[in-house]
Image (tube, rainbow, N blue to C red):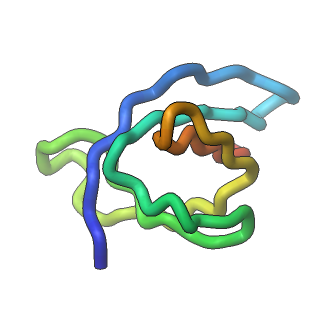
Amino acid sequence: MKQGFASVISNSKVMPATHLIWLKASQLDLEAQPGQFFMVRCGEGFECILRRPFSIHQIAFENKRAKLAFLFNI
């Protein structure tokens, strides 16, 4: 399992209770495709111990760095 850090570029509400979040990270696998899953953990503390599976909604490349979009319901 590969691990890396990502920073939030944007988080927009597209419908009631539905959000589209874009992440940028230099250590993500450049072979990732929409439909594959990432196990996401927010923060470094003990508030959220378990990771959550997020499927890639969209992917864009910029200077050999991946920008990933996740579409999710709250």
Give the quadrant of the C terminus. Answer: top right
Q: Quadrant of residue 42?
A: top left
Q: Position of residue 45 (x, y in %)?
A: 12, 43
For residue 53, side relative to residue 33 (left or right): left
Q: Residue at x 67, y 41 (%)?
A: 60
Q: Nearer the viewer, residue 14 or 63?
A: 63
Q: Residue at x 83, y 26 (%)?
A: 14
Q: Is residue 29 above or below residue 12?
A: below
For residue 47, side relative to residue 40 (left or right): left
Q: Position of residue 6 (x, y in %)?
A: 36, 39
Q: Position of residue 37 (x, y in %)?
A: 57, 70
Q: Is residue 1 visible?
A: yes
Q: Is residue 6 above or below residue 35?
A: above
Farthest residue to the left: give it.
45
Q: Is residue 72 visible?
A: no
Q: Quadrant of residue 1?
A: bottom left
Q: Residue at x 38, y 30 (%)?
A: 7
Farthest residue to the right: give it.
15
Q: Nearer the viewer, residue 70 or 17?
A: 70
